[in-house]
Image: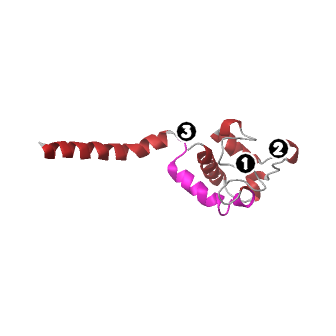
Amino acid sequence: MKTLTRLGLLAATLAFAVAAPASAQAKLPAGVTPAMVEKGKTIFKGTGLCFACHGPEAKGAVGPNLTDAEWIHVKDGDYTGIVALVTKGVAAGEAKLGKGPMPAKGGSQISDEDVKAVSAYVWSLSHS
């Protein structure tokens, strides 16, 4: 009987562990996957040039901190708003709190798909 109880406990634990990633995925914005977040992190720290202004850990430098809950140019850090901001950039006249301007796509040549991945990563930094 103890063996059956242990097996039941093991099965329940495994079921929870397998289900956990699905629930974590459910917390991401619609259309965003964990793979996009990981790809965005690589782009952020590389070809996207984001690290140059926001720092390698996105905690701010010339550009604002992207890891806290304070959003300067995007209401509540909304994913679609982040995509729009990265795509368009922030004009000098629109910059707030002395942070900005930011060229479209951070001055890089990343694709629209890459912008979505970077935006997914940026969203994840303050919505974990």
x, y percent for residue 86: 72, 48
**Which residue is found at the position 67% from the left and 63% from the top?**
47
Say which label, 1 or 2, has the lower sequence index. 1
Of the 4 image quadrants, the one containing the C terminus is top right
x, y percent for residue 72: 75, 41
Q: Which residues are the magenta region?
A: 28-53
x, y percent for residue 80: 65, 40
Judging depth in this view, the residue of 121 and 72 nearest the camera is 72
x, y percent for residue 34: 51, 50
Residues packed near mark 2 inside 10 Å, few (<14), some (14 to 19) or many (20 plus): few
> Marks 1 and 2, Cα distance to the nearest angstrom?
21 Å
> Marks 1 and 3, Cα distance to the nearest angstrom?
19 Å
Q: For residue 32: magenta?
A: yes
Say which label, 2 or 3, has the lower sequence index. 3
Q: For residue 18: magenta?
A: no
Q: Which residue is mark 1?
A: 87
Contact between marks 2 and 3 (CB within 8 A): the answer is no
**Which residue is found at the position 67% from the left and 45% from the top?**
83
* Residue type indicated by callout 2: Leu
Q: Which mark is residue 30?
A: 3
Say which label, 1 or 3, has the lower sequence index. 3
> Marks 2 and 3, Cα distance to the nearest angstrom?
30 Å
**Which residue is found at the position 55% from the left and 51% from the top?**
36
Q: Is residue 8 left or right of residue 103?
A: left
Residue farthest to the left, as pictured = 1
* Residue type indicated by callout 3: Ala
Q: Is residue 122 left or right of residue 32?
A: right
Judging depth in this view, the residue of 28 and 107 nearest the camera is 28
